[in-house]
Structure formats: structure tokens, C-alpha cells
Image (spheres, rainbow, N blue to C red):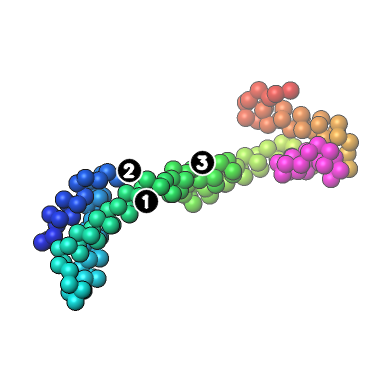
């Protein structure tokens, strides 16, 4: 490997690796040299130097082509959906657990201020049901559901010192 290190550098010098640097290309060249060492067959009447040069250049070209394809760009530059979907900002399990506990504590605090009907309506509302669907579940008219939601908003705003949207 040490004997042919200059060959790998010379083969890598003319190429450019998108998103990488010259050391990355030299590393790819060294992998090509390693392949040449493992697969060289003296009975094929070719000098090792020539065979190594072909293997090194092929490996470098493959790396440059793969980098230019942008095949892995979505994976390398993506944003995890877990936090966006659940509304939780933490990435670690500890942060997720703390966030869930805090959310549950806030919900418990709010529920202590609500009547049993308001608690049921809030639970259904948080599940994403429409006023009509909530009304069917609790056997109340849509207007009664709307009034309950407005009362819930006022109580939450008062509890947390926020102005509610009426």
C-alpha cells in the first residue's frame, strides 16, 4: 500500500468530488488499490502497476459518478417528520418523554377547570373531530358544541394568561 501511495495521489489529482475534498478521492483511490492487491493475477501477463492503475482510476470514476448522481441527496438533507407531525421538538427519547409529560400535565391542569361535558368535547376536539361529529358523540346540537369549545378556550386563556380568540 505504501509503495503505491504516490500512484493513488496522482490518479486522484485531476478529479473533483462534489461534496467532498481531495482526501476523499485519495481514500477512494486507496480502496481501488486494495482491490487491485486482492484480485491481481500474475498469470494474465499484465504488470501489477498497470492493473493497479486501472483499478484505482475505475474506483475514482465510480465515486465521482455516484456523487454527481445526487442519489442520496434526499436522505442527506432531509428533515425528520416525527417532530413536525407530533409537534414535539426533541430528538432524543428523553426529550420526547419530557415533552409528553409536560403536555399531559398541561392537559390535566386544563381538565381540572372543565366540566365533564367540556372534558369530553375537548378530548374529541383534540382527536380532530368536527363540531358535527362531536355533537353526535355527546348527543348535543352543533351550537352547544361550539359554545362549549368557546368556554374551553376562555378557561385555557385565563389559566395560562393568554388572550383568547373569540
Q: Disc 1 vs disc 2: Cβ atoms closer than 8 Å?
A: no
Judging depth in this view, the residue of 67 and 158 nearest the camera is 67
Q: Which mark is residue 18?
A: 2
Q: Quadrant of the C terminus?
A: top right
Sequence-wise, which precedes: disc 1 or disc 2?
2
Badge 3 is on which residue? Answer: 89
Q: How far across and how far down the image is residue 65, in percent? A: 35, 50
Which quarter of the picture shows residue 113?
Answer: top right
Main SS, magenta region, reads helix
- Alpha-carbon span between mark 1 and mark 2: 10 Å
What are the residue bounds of the magenta stretch?
A: 117-137
94 horizontally vs 20: left or right: right
Badge 1 is on which residue? Answer: 66
Q: How far across and how far down the image is residue 72, in percent? A: 43, 49
Q: How far across and how far down the image is residue 67, in percent? A: 36, 48
Q: Disc 3 vs disc 2: Cβ atoms closer than 8 Å?
A: no
Q: Which residue lies at the image location 15% right of the left edge and 67% below the top edge?
A: 47
Q: Disc 1 vs disc 3: Cβ atoms closer than 8 Å?
A: no
132 falls in the magenta region: yes
Amino acid at each position: 500500500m505504501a509503495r503505491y501511495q504516490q500512484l493513488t495521489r496522482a490518479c486522484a489529482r485531476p478529479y473533483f468530488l462534489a461534496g467532498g475534498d481531495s482526501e476523499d478521492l485519495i481514500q477512494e483511490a486507496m480502496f481501488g488499490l486494495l482491490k487491485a492487491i486482492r484480485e491481481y493475477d500474475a498469470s494474465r501477463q499484465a504488470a501489477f502497476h498497470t492493473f493497479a492503475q486501472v483499478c484505482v482510476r475505475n474506483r475514482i470514476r465510480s465515486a465521482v459518478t455516484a456523487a454527481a448522481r445526487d442519489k442520496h441527496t434526499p436522505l442527506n438533507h432531509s428533515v425528520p417528520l416525527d417532530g413536525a407531525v407530533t409537534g414535539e421538538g426533541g430528538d432524543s427519547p428523553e426529550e420526547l418523554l419530557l415533552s409528553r409529560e409536560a403536555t399531559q400535565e398541561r392537559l390535566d391542569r386544563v381538565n381540572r377547570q372543565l366540566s365533564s361535558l367540556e372534558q369530553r368535547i375537548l378530548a374529541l376536539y383534540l382527536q380532530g373531530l368536527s363540531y358535527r361529529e362531536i355533537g353526535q358523540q355527546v348527543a348535543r346540537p352543533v351550537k352547544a358544541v361550539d359554545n362549549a369549545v368557546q368556554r374551553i378556550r376562555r378557561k385555557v386563556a385565563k389559566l395560562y394568561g393568554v388572550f383568547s380568540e373569540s
